[in-house]
């Protein structure tokens, strides 16, 4: 299964991807996690991505497409993967389609998690508070000011993907306002029908 999880920042893509990994035994490919790992490791990609991520903007298509292209050729991706937070622009959507076609694969489904903007900011603030309470450092982009920019970027650059995948007959919509467990049940229900 080759699946995309789509939705605004904080919609629960990462949360649900982890559950799908357990159930389906295929890896989660989170571009956010890959970029944060590059920042922590101080690689060239990390150095270029850091300021962009801290500002809540999108890292360049060139960088992100390259890290995904490299990742999907690893052995654990042979039977499929869950793309979490990628693609985020129409150029990235074209790129992933080309990557899959080159390898003789296609996308099976795109699941959109639908969540109110108001609820999104509440989740992000809560995650930052929980990190601090646990003695960890909150993500630099998990604060209301940067979150506003992340959401603006989503509507400017990413929301167009909903129409794009709908037109291809690949879009499945799930209510992301429900509890985490209920969202998982609903995702599994729509995937069973793919
Ligand atoms: P990401 O790491 O992808 O961050 P995200 O969109 O905030 O995460 P997600 O939707 O997965 O939310 P989560 O499950 O964590 O991106 C960060 C940055 O990296 C971007 O701003 C950008 O700069 C860069 N980037 C990444 N990919 C890129 C790309 N393709 N192109 C360019 N730049 C890219 O959930 C959030 C919180 O909500 C959690 O605390 C969770 O516990 C809670 N939650 C989840 N589901 C819930 C539910 N049903 N009810 C209540 N709470 C819930």
Image: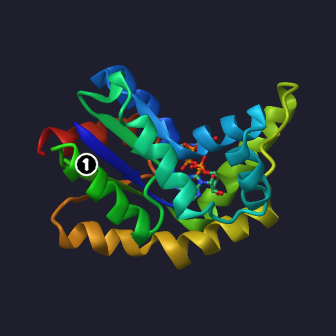
According to the image, label 1 marks what residue? 100
Where is residue 50 shown, x and y percent of the image?
77, 52
In percent of width and height, residue 163 lies at: 30, 75
Question: In which image quadrant can residue 152 be found?
Answer: bottom right
Name the one closer to the observer, 62 or 53. 62
In this picture, residue 38 sits left or right of residue 178: right
At horizontal 43% and vertical 52% (from top left) the residue drawn is 176
- From the Cβ of disc 1, is ligand 1 less than 8 Å away? no
Q: Is residue 182 left or right of residue 122?
A: left
| Residue name at image x 77 percent, y 48 percent | 47
Q: Is residue 28 above or below residue 6?
A: above
State whether residue 136 is above or below residue 43: above
Numbered-mark total: 1
Is there any visible trace of residue 94 in the rendered image?
yes
Q: Residues within 10 Å of mark 1 (few under 14, many from 20)?
A: some
Residue at 73% across / 39% down in the picture? 43
């Amino acid at each position: 299964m080759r699946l995309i999880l789509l939705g605004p920042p904080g919609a629960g893509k990462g949360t649900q991807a982890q559950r799908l990994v357990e159930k389906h035994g295929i890896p989660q490919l989170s571009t956010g996690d890959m970029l944060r790992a590059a920042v922590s490791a101080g690689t060239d990609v990390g150095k270029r991505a850091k300021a962009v991520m801290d500002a809540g903007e999108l890292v360049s298509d060139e960088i992100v497409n390259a890290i995904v292209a490299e990742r999907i050729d690893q052995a654990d991706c042979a039977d499929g993967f869950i793309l979490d937070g990628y693609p985020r622009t129409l150029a990235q959507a074209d790129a992933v389609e080309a990557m899959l076609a080159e390898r003789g694969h296609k996308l099976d489904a795109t699941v959109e998690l639908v969540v109110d903007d108001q609820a999104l900011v509440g989740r992000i603030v809560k995650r930052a508070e929980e990190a601090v309470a646990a003695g960890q450092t909150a993500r630099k982009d998990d604060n209301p000011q940067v979150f506003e920019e992340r959401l603006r970027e989503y509507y400017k650059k990413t929301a167009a993907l909903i129409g794009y995948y709908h037109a291809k007959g690949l879009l499945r919509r799930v209510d992301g306002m429900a509890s985490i467990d209920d969202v998982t049940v609903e995702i599994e229900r729509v995937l069973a029908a793919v």
